[in-house]
Image (tube, rainbow, N blue to C red):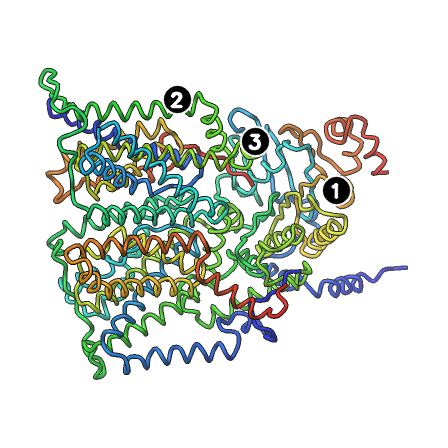
């Protein structure tokens, strides 16, 4: 009889609400609250550089969570995730520039518009079984990039656009990075909480059903085309929100930030983090952006060593090293960091009797 | 000596008190269980002149099938006779080239399969088709998909009513788990379960859909005697307590003869027999096609 | 009329190469059911290795081509052995993401060794000049390139059709387990498939480098070929050829006649809009296999 070791010993559910909780033990609840508190406290003790890293972590965690919903839960591949993130950024910029929206009004739109566009592109692909969404999203990438590049009157073409952080609210000036970080962190926590709720309720189960056995899902009363489109739409919603909060930090957006390469890294590091769990998504985003930060730190070193070659070298190194990391992790641990972490937890709980 | 019917019924309620009662309540909320008058009389599912061919090969030709309320219908026939294909046509997975399927006098031939499932035609599969990444209990709750009454936004925001609904669904699912005697493995990922348990989990998932009709595709294939008896017990319990008409494909003639109310025999996509178990066992056409040239052994079994 | 014929000719010339690259996707898809995005990166590697041999090391052309093909085969072996084989039996997502990673790895390697500059083969390894037929002038590069593409594809198809290994490949395409049970070495078939596919991609890279110049952007052609693969049906050589040619022609026509209406560069837009249309109208492609699902 297979033992259930996903929970620590001695945890029993006394009612169904307890069985449905995210954090089952008091220790875990405490750790989670402590973690969130520490994240908020960071706003006041870290300098702007470290905060900028944390903001990037947050934004990409949201984006990665969206991709997790598409790929890890619904089992579809999206090769246009970076582009949809860009759509989110541009949505904020366009609505601020042309229609005079403020950040708060533009933020939901930054989710909804990528969602609509994503669903539009998803519709042709989801009627078929298989990974056709990969091709549709690839097409979406090129169409989006083309549109942004050439619809100059609205998007300013290749010159990029400026967007503005929210106006001061209750005396909190979001132009100061630490307050903006608090905003970003709050949005991130809320979005991740929503994603967690999504995955443990009706639609989340439908996603997994479609991923694991789409034929059975169809015959068991789940509309798979509908479910897949919704998964893609929600994933793009997350990408858009991630773009909006990330773009708000830089207060500028340029179409060159969203390349196919970024979309591939999104996918690659998602798998590195681990498919099918929110923790895996966050882990993937953090690993990716930490590497990004490291390669930026290495650039001066490379310049000192290589001189004029440094430009190629740093670009090439990030490509080579990232792809090697993705490939090696996948080959050695195809289920990602999260899976390894589960194994560690499990063996700790079972110690000293590993059977 | 008169039997106190109420007492028998009460005993029966007690017998099922460890499972299925909640599911029955949930079903009774939507519709009335069939009355004694309707049983064996009212036709609930009718497949008329179904013809389907794959690349010129006739898998089914002009097969007609009628299922009445409260009936346990067994479909038998040699391998490749088109039994599973017939179920696939009924559940909307294959489109029949000719013929219609009626469910409660409604034509459902061209409905998509998820809609047919939501209407209450639920099934299990010959080759197990569970959601391998989910635990047993989640598989069963996933089966309740069409009966969960909140949209995804409510789920995402986890409003109190969504939470209550989730708890209610979980309660029903636990009820089914209790009934199927899978308590110890309820939180185990189904990919890690043994074959027999997986088959059982699949039955549970089909039950979770609150079936109006249950289609079972070889529920006992590849099982040992104990497991077979368990499954047979479950099927009879479901049939009696929820009064669900069941269509069952099964090769084990002993079981079929024991529990089926009526038997349909298919051979090479043609219906060659339809009748009570005793009649089928004696029908020379059926005996020669399926039970063997002489049919001695089966005749022996039936007697 | 003259423009029309010219466009068709140009389209066929670039379409020939799309067809070749599409075939290189199809080879791997047929054997392993994996869509190997890495073949787009292989084009870049192929074109740069030829440039390295031909220009930097000043080797004769036949030797350069042989070396490039050999390098392509070795890379194929390495990918198959180190990346793909450990992932057999894993969820299909893992190998696909690995091929995407390999595609970027190739890009990184090309950037590292050759700095991503656009190079040329110092003229061309195919004869220059043009044939004049009436008002049409056929550049010899394009004609020879087209001929090479078609010859390579024809050789491949006849290999699949007439040799024992080719038969094995077709069996593997039907079902891995059945093939294994029939005594076919499925792993060896995977290996051969990767080697063939990468060699074909290297040839494609050389031809593209000859026409467009050697550079990192050649992998865009590989992405365009994806549209061709989908149009032809994921598992059909004939479909890939017809679809590749069609995509080439459609692309040239669109640039010719729609280019004036739409702003900016539409070279990449056209194939992908077309891809969406295919998904909408004929999702399994022209000759794709619609499998009957079983329950």
Q: Position of residue C159 (x, y in %)?
A: 40, 24
Whether residue A42 is visible here, answered yes or no, is yes
Please determine whether, in this image, residue A72 is positioned above or below residue B103.
Answer: below
Q: Is residue B80 left or right of residue C201?
A: right
Crowd tier of the residue under label 1, counting other residues whose Cα lies within 10 Å: few below 14, some 14–19, many 20 or above: many
Q: Position of residue C176 (x, y in %)?
A: 51, 36
Which label is found at residue C158?
Answer: 2
Q: Label 1: chain?
A: B
Residue behind mark 3:
C183
Q: Label 2: chain?
A: C
Q: Nearer the viewer, mark 3 or mark 2?
A: 3
Q: Secondary structure at mark 2?
A: helix
Earlier sequence position, callout 3 versus callout 2:
2
The residue shown at (31%, 79%) is A42
Q: Position of residue B67 (x, y in %)?
A: 65, 42
Q: Residue furthest right?
A: B1
Q: Looking at this view, is C171 or A69 the one in front? A: C171
Q: Nearer the viewer, mark 2 or mark 1?
A: 2
Q: Nearer the viewer, mark 1 or mark 3?
A: 3
Quadrant location of residue C216? top left
Which label is found at residue B256?
Answer: 1
Q: Label 3: chain?
A: C
Figure quadrant of the C terminus of chain A? bottom right
Q: Position of residue B64 (x, y in %)?
A: 62, 33
User: Do tags 1 and 3 sit on the same chain?
Assistant: no
Q: Secondary structure at mark 1?
A: helix
Q: Is residue B239 left or right of residue A149?
A: right
User: Do tags 2 and 1 sit on the same chain?
Assistant: no
């Amino acid at each position: 009889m297979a033992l259930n070791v996903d929970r620590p010993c001695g945890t029993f559910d006394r009612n169904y609400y307890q069985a449905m909780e995210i954090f089952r033990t008091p220790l875990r609840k405490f750790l989670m609250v402590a973690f969130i508190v520490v994240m908020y406290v960071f706003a006041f003790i870290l300098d702007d550089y470290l905060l900028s890293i944390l903001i990037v972590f947050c934004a990409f965690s949201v984006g990665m969570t969206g991709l997790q919903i598409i790929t890890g839960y619904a089992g579809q591949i999206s090769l246009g995730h970076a582009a949809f993130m860009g759509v989110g950024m541009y949505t904020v910029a366009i609505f601020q520039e042309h229609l005079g929206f403020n950040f708060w009004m533009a933020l939901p739109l930054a989710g909804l518009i990528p969602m609509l566009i994503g669903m539009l592109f998803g519709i042709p692909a989801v009627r078929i079984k298989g990974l056709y969404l990969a091709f549709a999203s690839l097409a979406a990438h090129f169409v989006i990039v083309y549109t942004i590049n050439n619809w100059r009157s609205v998007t300013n073409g290749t010159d990029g656009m400026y967007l503005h952080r929210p106006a001061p609210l209750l005396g909190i000036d979001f132009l100061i990075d630490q307050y903006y970080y608090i905003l970003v962190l709050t949005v991130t926590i809320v979005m991740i909480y929503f994603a967690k709720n999504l995955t443990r309720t009706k639609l989340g189960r439908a996603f997994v059903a479609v991923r694991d056995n789409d034929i059975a899902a169809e015959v068991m009363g789940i509309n798979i085309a509908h479910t897949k489109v919704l998964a893609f739409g929600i994933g793009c919603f997350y990408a858009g929100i991630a773009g909006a909060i990330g773009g708000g930090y830089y207060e500028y957006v340029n179409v060159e930030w969203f390349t196919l390469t970024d979309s591939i890294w999104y996918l690659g590091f998602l798998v590195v983090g681990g498919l099918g769990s929110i923790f895996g998504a966050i882990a993937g985003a953090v690993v990716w952006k930490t590497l990004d930060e490291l390669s930026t730190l290495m650039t001066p070193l490379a310049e000192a060593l290589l001189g004029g070659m440094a430009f190629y070298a740093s670009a090439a190194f990030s490509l080579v090293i990232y792809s090697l990391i993705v490939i090696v992790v996948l080959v050695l641990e195809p289920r990602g960091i999260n899976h390894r972490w589960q194994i560690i937890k499990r063996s700790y709980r079972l110690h000293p009797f590993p059977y | 000596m008169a039997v106190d019917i109420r007492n028998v019924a009460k005993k029966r309620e007690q017998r099922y008190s460890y499972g299925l009662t909640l599911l029955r309540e949930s079903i009774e909320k939507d519709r009335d269980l069939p009355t004694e008058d309707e049983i064996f009389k009212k036709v609930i599912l009718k497949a008329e002149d179904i013809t389907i061919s794959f690349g010129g090969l006739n898998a089914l030709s002009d097969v007609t099938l009628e299922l009445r309320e409260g009936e346990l219908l067994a479909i038998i026939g040699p391998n490749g006779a088109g039994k599973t294909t017939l179920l696939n046509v009924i559940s909307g997975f294959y489109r029949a080239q000719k013929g219609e399927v009626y469910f409660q006098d409604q034509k459902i031939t061209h409905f998509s399969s998820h809609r047919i499932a939501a209407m209450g035609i639920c099934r299990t599969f010959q080759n197990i088709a569970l959601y391998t990444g989910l635990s047993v209990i989640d598989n069963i709750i996933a089966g309740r998909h069409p009966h969960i009454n909140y949209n995804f936004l409510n789920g995402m925001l986890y409003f109190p009513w969504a939470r209550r609904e989730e708890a209610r669904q979980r309660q029903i699912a636990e009820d089914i788990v209790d009934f199927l005697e899978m308590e110890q493995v309820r939180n185990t990922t189904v990919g890690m379960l043994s074959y027999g348990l997986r088959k059982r989990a699949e039955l549970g998932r089909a039950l979770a859909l609150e079936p109006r009709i249950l289609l079972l595709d070889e529920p006992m294939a590849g099982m040992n005697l104990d497991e077979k008896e368990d499954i047979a017990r479950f099927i009879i319990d479901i049939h009696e307590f929820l009064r669900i008409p069941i269509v069952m494909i099964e090769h084990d003639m002993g079981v079929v003869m024991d529990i089926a109310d009526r038997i349909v025999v298919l051979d090479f996509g043609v219906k060659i027999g339809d009748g009570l178990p005793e009649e089928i066992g004696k029908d020379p056409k059926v005996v020669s096609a399926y039970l063997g040239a002489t049919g001695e052994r089966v005749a022996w079994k039936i007697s | 009329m003259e423009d029309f014929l010219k466009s068709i000719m140009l389209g066929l010339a670039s379409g020939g190469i799309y067809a070749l690259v599409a075939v290189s996707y199809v080879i791997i898809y047929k054997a392993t059911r994996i869509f190997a995005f890495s073949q787009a990166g292989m084009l870049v590697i192929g074109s740069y290795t030829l440039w390295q041999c031909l220009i930097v090391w000043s080797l004769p052309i036949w030797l350069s081509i042989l070396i490039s093909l050999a390098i392509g085969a070795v890379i194929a072996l390495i990918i198959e052995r180190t990346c793909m084989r450990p992932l057999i039996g894993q969820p299909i997502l893992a190998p696909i993401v690995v091929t995407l990673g390999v595609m970027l790895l190739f890009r990184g390697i090309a950037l590292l060794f050759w700095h991503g500059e656009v190079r040329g083969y110092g003229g061309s390894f195919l004869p220059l000049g043009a044939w004049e037929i009436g008002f049409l002038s056929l550049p010899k590069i394009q004609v020879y390139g087209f001929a090479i593409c078609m010859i390579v594809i024809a050789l491949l198809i006849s290999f699949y059709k007439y040799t024992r290994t080719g038969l094995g490949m077709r069996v593997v395409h039907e079902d891995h387990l059945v093939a294994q049970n029939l005594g076919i070495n499925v792993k060896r078939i995977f290996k051969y498939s990767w080697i063939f596919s990468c060699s074909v991609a290297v040839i494609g890279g050389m031809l593209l480098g000859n026409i467009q110049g050697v550079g990192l952007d050649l992998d865009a052609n590989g992405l365009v070929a994806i549209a061709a693969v989908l149009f032809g049906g994921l598992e059909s050589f004939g479909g890939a050829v017809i679809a590749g040619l069609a995509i080439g022609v459609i692309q040239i026509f669109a640039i010719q006649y729609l280019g004036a209406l739409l702003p900016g560069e539409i070279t990449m837009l056209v194939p992908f809009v077309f891809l969406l249309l295919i998904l909408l109208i004929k999702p399994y492609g022209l000759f794709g296999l619609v499998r009957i699902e079983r329950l």
